[in-house]
Amino acid sequence: MADPPTLVTGATGFVGSAVARVLAARGHRLRLLVRPGGDRRNVEGLEAELATGDLTDPASLARAADGCRYLVHVAADYRLWVPDPDAMMRANVDGTRALLLAAQSRGVERMVYCSSVAALGLVGDGSVADETTPVHPDKIVGVYKRSKYLAEQAVLALVAEHAMPVVVVNPSTPVGPRDIKPTPTGRMIRDAAAGRLPAYVDTGLNVVHVDDVAEGHALALERGVVGEKYILGGEDFSLGDLFALVARVAGRTPPRVRLPIGPLVPLALACEALARFGVEPLVTRETLAMARKKMFFSSDKARRELGYAPRPAARAIEDAIAWFRAQ
């Protein structure tokens, strides 16, 4: 008799497709939740059962979880600007809660929830944050970050109140192949590699190879402590240093102009006005507010407790640029 399947949500996306591949290599029989009519290029060639459903359709989530032993929930609405914030909240917060409850009702033994460092506290001044850094909910900037914070809080409440067997992982900024949308970070790296970014703002982020994030999900499923959070990060970069690395890999000249954030506010307002007519904004007031804080994180807990061992971030940049060029 075949082993019960492992349900993976978000497998058609960037991080989820990497997670599905890592689990398949570990011998998991996969069931993938896919949206009707969604882009399935990232799961081509994967041996997996497809379950059609959506995070906003609880009945479809119950059907997908039926008979599964494990759940790895990666799916999320990841955009830095949305015309309808309520839709993002329904998917990321309500959908996550509905999925986990459906999985528990179907007897799923163990679950991993893919949160984000966006849900964690931030020091912001160049110091490194970790899983214990205090969160100030009133200072969370942007609907995506707020949705991920509220979703993580909902998951931890399910663990406490319903003995939900969930381990939480918090990826930093994944980079690498199969970023088909691409994500906001992938778009930035693609454009920098093509020489289309003449300037940058002074901020910072933590970059990690998407395949290492996927490995971290598998390790959390195997070794993580229920109710605990694990940052899955790589290396901290200032944006200038990151673009210098991208330029070196791509054979380009890095952008030399560092822009102050304040004078960009009128541009953000103009971009937001155009967005009402369907033009995706290049910059918004929220992204500028986020850029004021350096998003540096430590993965020491995951290294220590899970055996997490990310490769140098330069490999992530190399693999991402090679993939974008191939496309």
Image: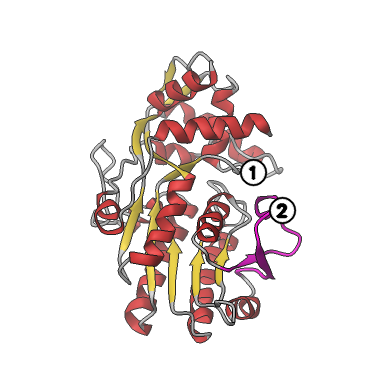
Q: Which mark is residue 180?
A: 1
Question: Percent x, y for residue 281?
Answer: 60, 38
Foreground residue among 251 and 58:
251
Mark earlier in primary sequence (2, 1)? 2
Q: Which residues are magenta?
A: 29-55
* Residue 72 versus residue 14 in the image, above or below: below
* Residue 161 numbered mark, or none: none
Q: Quadrant of residue 170?
A: bottom left
Q: Residue at x 34, y 83 (%)?
A: 161
User: What amino acid is at disc 2?
Assistant: Asp
Q: Are marks 2 and 1 in contact (CB under 8 Å)?
A: yes
Is residue 49 in the magenta section? yes
Q: Label 1 crowding class (10 Å Cα cut-off): few <14, some 14-19, many 20+?
A: some
Q: Which quadrant holds residue 302?
A: bottom left
Q: Secondary structure at mark 2?
A: loop
Cα gap from disc 2 to disc 1, whole angstroms? 9 Å
- Which residue occupies the extreme right position in the image? 37
Crowding near pointer 2: few (<14 within 10 Å), some, many (20+)?
A: few
Question: Image height check: is 51 above or below 172?
Answer: below
Image point 31% across, 58% down: which residue?
A: 306
Horizontal and vertical percent for residue 191?
58, 27
Residue 279: in sight, yes or no?
yes
Residue 115 visible, this angle: no
**Is 239 situated left or right of 93 in this image?**
left
- The amino acid beneath tag 1 is Ile
Which residue is tagged 2? 39
